[in-house]
């Protein structure tokens, strides 16, 4: 069995300040982990993925995430938030064959 | 490369009717999966098809069904619609490698009145 917990339902930051979106996971397998972003009335867009290569993964739009097995975490960060980053973010774990589990999502609010 | 295309974008139906949603995957992708997204339940997996065969199924009633054609296009059908079926229905496709990420369409917004 596997699960994903996104620790914050909402995160508010000011433009230009760092972003941290937290994700913890559990999996019986060696997991693949993903972060997706969803803008209003749109589908989910892949930001980055971890598949047992480098533990620090760089994604699009300046986002990156670090896989920490000892902490079972895969937190998403960005050094400086932009207004266009305001959206909902989903952490996803793939464990066994074709089994995907989505977190509940974190809404990122960016104020000017 | 064209992305995942879902049609229609919006649908309004009444209770008891049925509805069919369509999804065209990225060219070369043979795996198509469907998800229901609601504010209360978040993203829930409906089913996955690969090469015209259903490979996985989520915990949804039999009113929800799907199929995949030989060109990998997929359809999802919901019969006897209920108010609670109102949701954004997302389709995603992926490549053959097990670690391939999902590529999502923009979804079909279904409203049941």
Image: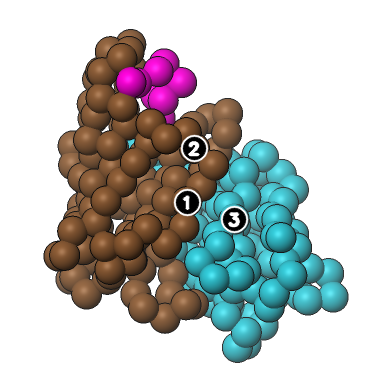
Chain colours: A cyan, B brown
Q: Chain of mark 3?
A: A
Q: Are marks 2 and 1 in contact (CB under 8 Å)?
A: yes
Chain label for disc 2: B
Q: Residues within 10 Å of mark 1 (few under 14, many from 20)?
A: some
Regarding residue B22, the answer to whether it shows in the image is yes
Give the CA distance from mark 1 to mark 3.
13 Å
Q: Residues within 10 Å of mark 3 (few under 14, many from 20)?
A: many
Residue bearing mark 2:
B60
Reply above or below: B94 against B74.
below
Q: CA distance from mark 2 to mark 3?
A: 16 Å
Q: Quadrant of residue B50?
A: bottom left
Q: Position of residue A105 (x, y in %)?
A: 59, 45
Q: Are marks 1 and 3 in contact (CB under 8 Å)?
A: no
Q: Which residue reaches farthest left?
A: B71
Q: Write the residue at 36% across / 78% down.
A: B96
Give the image location of residue A102, x and y in percent.
58, 52
Single out the mark in the foreground, 2 or 3.
2
Do discs 1 and 3 belong to a common subunit?
Answer: no
Q: Which residues are magenta?
A: B80-87
Real-space CA distance between mark 2 and mark 1, rounded to the nearest whole angstrom: 8 Å
In the image, taking residue B58 as reference, residue A9 lies left or right, namely: right
Disc 1 target residue: B57
Where does the image place residue A55, in percent across and percent down from the top left? 67, 82
* Label 3 SS: strand
Q: Is residue B82 magenta?
A: yes
Identify the residue position indicated by label 3 in the image.
Answer: A101
Compared with B80, B76 (above or below) is below
């Amino acid at each position: 069995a596997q699960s994903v917990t996104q620790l914050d339902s909402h995160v508010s930051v000011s433009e230009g300040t760092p972003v941290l979106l937290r994700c913890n996971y559990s999996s019986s397998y060696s997991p693949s982990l993903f972060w997706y972003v969803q803008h209003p009335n749109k589908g989910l867009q892949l930001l980055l993925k971890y598949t047992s290569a480098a533990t620090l993964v760089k994604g699009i739009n300046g986002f990156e995430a670090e896989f920490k097995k000892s902490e079972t975490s895969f937190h998403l960060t960005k050094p400086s938030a932009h207004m266009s980053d305001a959206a909902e973010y989903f952490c996803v774990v793939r464990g066994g064959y074709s089994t995907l589990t989505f977190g509940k999502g974190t809404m990122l609010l960016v104020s000017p | 490369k064209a992305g995942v295309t879902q049609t229609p974008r919006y649908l309004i139906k009444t209770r008891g009717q049925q509805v069919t949603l369509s999804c065209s995957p990225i060219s070369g992708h043979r795996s198509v999966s469907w998800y229901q997204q609601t504010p209360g339940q978040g993203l829930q997996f409906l089913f996955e098809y690969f090469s015209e065969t259903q490979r996985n199924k989520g915990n949804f009633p039999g009113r929800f069904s799907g199929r995949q054609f030989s060109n990998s296009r997929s359809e999802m059908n919901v019969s006897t619609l209920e108010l609670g079926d109102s949701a954004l229905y997302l389709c995603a496709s992926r490549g053959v490698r097990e670690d391939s990420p999902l590529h999502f369409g923009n979804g079909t917004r279904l409203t049941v009145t």
